[in-house]
């Protein structure tokens, strides 16, 4: 049993989801997991005897223009380590979490292993900004164990930051088959969203620019001209205003439903026919995997780690980012060809179950923890 300090963002976003769900599996496997974050991670809602949450409190002081979260988090990691005897720190998203954990390590008397999981934009976007490049490189170097959620992200990391002495272990994200599974469409609330047998197209994201949500609207506009259908938009974020304007401009208000942030996306996916993810960049695409697990074929961009998740022409269609015409044609094909649809839907559910089981990910992380601990012991 390991006492793990799990650091993540609490807000809607894949890295917080992965951290929370990993916490439950590790807790079930007998580890004690202490979440340290600015708020309770949104998927950490169920009680578990081995899961704990420690909030990083804000400190306001007139001289601070910005609250120094990195320092407050470092201090909290030290506090929790002393209080409960953490044996390892596992941070999700390098910036600023690895830096905080590294600072915490300097303040502690005992050496403690630090594992960083890279999720995507911490490397491909934020990490590559000039302002963060050196810090991210340092975060990679000071980690005793490094994991990436896809081979594509591991390769991008070495391309952007050069080779790393401890190497990068690829641990793909996973999906809980008890929450995400196919359900007969007439068993769901579907009728209230898409009456009279209309089709339902779904997009879930944090509505950041990188997600290309306006493309979702453009694709939907083309599809609904040919097939009676509705669009479900789940999530919220900086692009929401732009998306609402795009929907209004195209006269689609009656056909597009904005559901906002939702905790239970499993039920929404179970009533959907097609999942759209036309992102500019996606290191993994957790929402696409969740859709597949519910038997929903995916139409997405052929970028980053998406080809490691969506098997081309088996569980969905991948097209170049920005190819609105190609993606519309793929959705129309799926909705018009029942045989093709059934085959892809069944393959998607089977593949999610076989290739992305939570237990496999938990065992892989345990191995990374073991290696990182050995590395720290050898240095002592
Ligand atoms: O960039 C985001 O959309 C949020 C980010 C996050 O904070 O979780 O998502 C990244 O991590 C997810 C979980 O590992 C991946 O499924 C997403 O593909 C990845 N996003 C991008 O690479 C854009």
Image (spheres, helix red, strand yellow):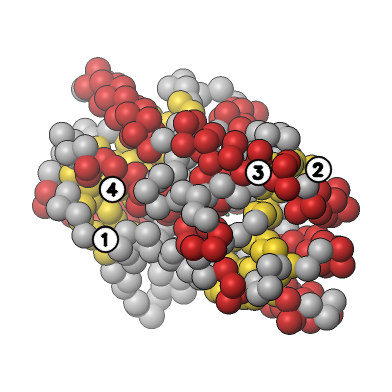
Of the two numbered discs 3 and 1 on the same chain, state the one appearing first in sequence. Answer: 1
Secondary structure beneath label 4: helix
Secondary structure beneath label 2: loop
Picture quarter with the N terminus: top left
Q: Is mark 1 within 8 Å of ligand 1?
A: no
* Left or right position of 151 against 115: right
Find residue 303 and report its horizontal and vertical position in percent: 71, 40
Location of mark 1 (residue): 46
Query: Residue 23 or 179: which is nearer the viewer?
Result: 179
The residue at the point 47 percent across, 58 percent down is 266
Label 2 vs label 3, nearer the camera: 3
Of the two numbered discs 4 and 1 on the same chain, state the one appearing first in sequence. Answer: 4
Q: CA distance from mark 3 to mark 1?
A: 34 Å
What label does residue 320 carry, if any?
2
The residue at the point 40 percent across, 46 percent down is 176
Q: Is mark 4 within 8 Å of ligand 1?
A: no
Q: CA distance from mark 3 to mark 4?
A: 33 Å
Secondary structure beneath label 1: loop
Mark 2 crowdedness (10 Å alpha carbons): few <14, some 14-19, many ≥20: some
Label 2 vs label 1, nearer the camera: 1
What label does residue 342 carry, if any?
3
Location of mark 4 (residue): 24
């Amino acid at each position: 049993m390991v006492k793990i300090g799990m650091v993540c963002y609490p807000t809607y976003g894949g890295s917080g989801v992965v951290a929370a769900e990993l916490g439950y599996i590790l807790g079930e496997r007998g580890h004690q997991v202490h979440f340290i974050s600015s708020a309770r991670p949104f998927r950490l809602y169920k009680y578990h005897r081995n899961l704990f949450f420690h909030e990083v409190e804000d400190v306001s002081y007139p001289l601070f223009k910005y609250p120094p979260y990195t320092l407050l988090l470092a201090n909290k990691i030290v506090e929790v380590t002393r209080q409960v005897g953490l044996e390892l720190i596992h941070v999700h998203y390098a910036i600023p979490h690895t830096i905080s954990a590294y600072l915490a390590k300097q303040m502690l008397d005992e050496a403690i292993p630090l594992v960083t999981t890279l999720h995507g934009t911490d490397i491909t976007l934020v990490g590559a900004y000039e302002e963060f490049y050196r810090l991210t490189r340092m975060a990679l170097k000071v980690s005793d164990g490094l994991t990436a959620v896809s081979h594509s992200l591991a390769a991008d990391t070495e391309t952007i930051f050069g080779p790393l002495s401890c190497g990068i272990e690829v641990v793909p994200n996973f999906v809980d088959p008890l929450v995400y599974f196919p359900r007969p469409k007439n068993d769901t609330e579907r009728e209230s969203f898409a009456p009279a047998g209309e089709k339902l197209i779904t997009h879930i994201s944090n509505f950041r620019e990188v997600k290309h949500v306006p493309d979702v609207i453009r694709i939907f506009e083309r599809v609904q001209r040919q097939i009676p259908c509705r669009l479900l938009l789940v999530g919220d974020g900086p692009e929401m205003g732009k998306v609402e304007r795009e929907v209004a401009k195209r006269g689609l208000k009656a056909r597009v439903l904005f559901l906002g942030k939702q905790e239970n996306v499993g039920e929404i996916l179970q009533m959907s026919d097609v999942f759209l993810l036309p992102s500019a960049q996606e290191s993994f695409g957790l929402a696409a995997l969740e859709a597949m697990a519910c038997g929903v074929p995916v139409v997405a961009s052929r970028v980053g780690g998406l080809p490691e998740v969506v098997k081309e022409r088996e569980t969905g269609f991948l097209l170049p980012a920005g190819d609105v015409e190609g993606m519309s044609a793929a959705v129309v094909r799926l909705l018009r060809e029942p045989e093709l649809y059934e085959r892809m839907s069944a393959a998607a559910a089977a593949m999610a179950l076989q290739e992305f089981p939570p237990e496999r990910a938990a065992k892989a992380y345990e191995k990374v923890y073991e290696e990182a601990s050995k590395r720290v012991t050898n240095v002592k």
